[in-house]
Structure formats: structure tokens, C-alpha cells
Image (cartoon, helix red, strand yellow):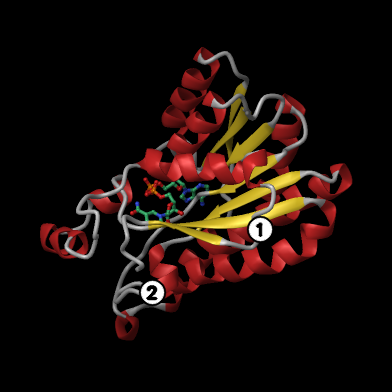
Amino acid sequence: MLENKTALVTGAGRGIGRAIALALAECGADVAVNYSGSKEQAEETVRQIIEMGRKAVAIQADVSEEADCVRMFAQAEEALGPVDILVNNAGITRDGLAVRMSGEDFEKVLDVNLKGAFYCMKLAAKGMMKRRYGRIVSISSISGVKGNPGQINYCAAKAGIIGMTKSLARELAPRGITVNAIAPGYIESDMTAVLPDKVKESVLSQVPLGRMGKPEDIAQAAVFLASDQASYITGQTLLVDGGMGI
Ligand code: NAP
């Protein structure tokens, strides 16, 4: 399904990003595996992709730094060829009530989750426009759709992803490039493992399907949006949330 395609997935050493990188490779894509600090985990993702018979390369870059993103795209293209599929997955949280949140914590979350996605969108779009083909998928969040107490910074960034997705979808549609987002609900990963049990129980009680999602649930949606089967879908945000957003 994705043979002869090159994908770049940010934050693909672990969690949802790793699951997306592996699922894209399973469908035939070669994958550039970005990480910021998790070198060994990124190398493990690469090893698993190579074992599937695909090409892969691990590339260190902090997506909140534009110069890092420029270098990352150059390295990815040198190793695997032009990027056909970009998945903006890298993300962090720095939770706290709005009245107590420092400007630094607000800014840091926007820098990684929103500005990082912008830099990568911009760099990917340049090559995609020339080739008149491309798929951009960004990971937003149910928090960006509904809001969440204690996450004013994260919700701003994730809602921003939805706005950027719509805007870029309009800009790139004439070139046959689609731009979409996925809003995961409550997914098993390092990000949610640290939540206190009380919070976990409360969030779970809001999931109609009655279970946490798995990184693979998000990965399958990303593969679909990256595929030719989704060629008439653009500017959309797909909630993959067990019904939380109903
Ligand atoms: P995670 O396990 O904490 O993974 C976060 C990933 O982001 C890691 O691979 C990390 O790489 C990468 N990352 C962080 N800062 C980075 C930076 N400056 N540059 C490049 N990469 C960076 O979280 P996850 O649950 O898999 O989350 C993946 C995405 O899904 C995030 O955007 C998150 O907001 C979103 N999401 C998650 C949930 C959930 O319930 N888990 C729900 C909604 C949305 P390093 O380890 O190398 O730093």
C-alpha cells in the first residue's frame, strides 16, 4: 500500500510515534525515525523496520529548533529520498492550573507541539509541492477539541494543530497534497503512565468503549490518512478516542 514511499515520523523512538513508524513500514514505507533524547529506543525502532525489509534511519533533532528540523529533513532525504509522508507526532506536556502556570511552561509546550509541527510542515511542503504529491498527518488531541483543566498550554497547542491543518490543507490542495490531523483520546504510553490512579479512573469513566486506546489504534488511523484510500480527505481531524468526544 505504501511501497516506494518515504515517511518521516517525529518522536518515533517510543510510544505512539514508534507504533506509527512500524505500521507505515509494515505497509511498505521506508521511514526516517526522529528522536530528541531516546537514541537507543529510536535505534530499536529502526532495527524493527529493517527486519521487515524496509529502509530506516534514526535522526536526532529537537523539533522546536528550526535549524534541527532543516538538518533532519536533509539527513532523511539523503538517506531515504524525498519525504512523501510527514507525521508530526512529537509532543510533551507540562500540566498545571492556568493561574499557577509559568510563561516558560506555556511556551515550552507550544514550542515543541505547535512550532515543531509548523517547521516540519513547512519543510515537508516545499518538496511535496514540487512533486505534486504528499501526505501530512499531525497528532492533535481530544484535549485540543474539548479542552482539559490543567492543560491550558497543551490544549492551546493541540487546538493550534487543528487550525494549522485546515489552513495548510487549503494551501496545498491545488497540488494534490492532503493535510489531516488525528485527535487521540486516552492512549497507553509513557505520557499517560505517569497520571495519578484517581485521574486515570476518572478519564477512563469518560470513554464509552470502556478501555484505554493502544498506540496501534492511532497508528492504523495514521496509515489510512497516509494512504491513497484517503486521497479525498483533507483538512480533517479524526477523533480516535473510544467515543470520548461524542
Ligand atoms: P510519549 O510516550 O511521551 O512520547 C513523546 C514522543 O515525543 C517521544 O518519542 C519523544 O521523543 C518525542 N519528543 C518530545 N519532545 C521532542 C522534541 N523536542 N523533538 C523531537 N521529539 C520530541 O507520548 P505519546 O503518548 O506517545 O504521545 C505522542 C503524541 O500523541 C504527542 O503529540 C501527544 O501529545 C499525543 N497524544 C497522546 C495521547 C495519550 O493519551 N498518550 C493523547 C492525545 C494525544 P524523545 O523521547 O526522543 O524525546
Quarter placement of the N terminus: top right
Q: Secondary structure at mark 2?
A: helix
67 to the left or right of 141: right
Residue 106, located in which quarter of the rendered image? bottom left
Does 104 appear above or below 23? Answer: below
- Along the viewing direction, whichever of 84 and 190 lies nearer the viewer: 84
Distance from the alpha carbon under mark 1 to that under mark 2: 21 Å
The residue that label 1 is drawn on is 234
The residue that label 2 is drawn on is 146
Q: Residues within 10 Å of mark 1 (few under 14, many from 20)?
A: many
Q: Amino acid at mark 2?
A: Lys
Residue sticking out furthest to the left? 198
Q: Position of residue 12 (x, y in %)?
A: 49, 38
- Which residue sits at x=74%, y=56%? 122
Q: Position of residue 223 (x, y in %)?
A: 54, 39
Residue 154 appearing in the image: no
Between circles 1 and 2, the one closer to the viewer is 1
- Which residue sits at x=66%, y=56%? 179
- Which residue sits at x=55%, y=70%? 160
Residue sticking out furthest to the right? 130
- Along the viewing direction, whichever of 82 and 99 lies nearer the viewer: 82
- Which residue sits at x=84%, y=50%? 129
